[in-house]
Amino acid sequence: MAGPLGRIIAQVVILGVSVLTRALPAAYAAAVQNAKKNGVDKASAAVSKSKISLDEALMIMNLKDSGSKVTAEAVQKQYDRYFEANAVEKGGSFYLQSKVYRAKEMLDEYVKEQKDEEKKRASQ
């Protein structure tokens, strides 16, 4: 009784393995082809675009952009305050410290763009 049942199980296993040995390389080749065509560029662009939005940066730094200008001094003051408050050595959160750092990067870039626009307006 175990003989015929064992033979059937062995045939099913062999059939399954043979199907997988043909299907996996074909699926891998298709995935590589798709990645070369358009997937890799989009994925690398998404990874490199890890910047946060201006609104999020303003919220993190507790600054308001409505009407008043965001100054480099205000950004630096808030950065020092929040970065120190979330220092890992003092039991703070590295994640929050990183958010504060990324917000400062974004706001520094924003302040620089504002100054460049003012220079363009002044020169015209």
Image (cartoon, grey):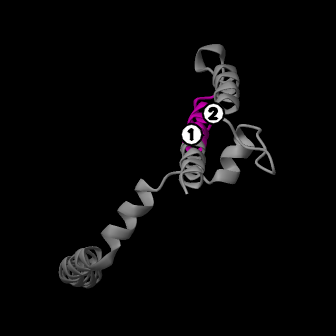
Tag 2 secondary structure: helix
* Pick the front one: 102 or 74: 74
**Mark 1, residue position:** 108
Asked if the magenta segment contains residue 88, the reply would be: no
Write the start and end of the magenta stretch as one range: 93-108
The type of residue carrying mark 1 is: Asp
The reply, left or right, for residue 116 in relation to residue 53 is left
Are there few (<14), some (14-19), or many (20+) residues within 10 Å of tag 2? Answer: some
For residue 9, above or below residue 110: below
Residue at left 65%, top 19%?
84
Are there few (<14), some (14-19), or many (20+) residues within 10 Å of tag 1? Answer: some
Q: Identify the image quadrant of the C terminus.
A: bottom right
Q: Quadrant of residue 35?
A: bottom left
Residue at left 76%, top 40%?
63
| Disc 1 to disc 2: CB gap under 8 Å | yes
For residue 10, above or below residue 57: below
* Pick the front one: 120 or 63: 120
| Residue 50 x %, y % | 49, 52
* Overall secondary structure of the magenta section: helix
Residue at left 59%, top 37%?
104
N-terminal-most mark, 1 or 2: 2
* Pick the front one: 78 or 42: 78
On residue 55, which mark appears?
none
| Residue 75 x %, y % | 66, 33
**Mark 2, residue position:** 72
* Distance Cα–Cα, label 1 vs label 2: 7 Å
Q: Quadrant of residue 99?
A: top right
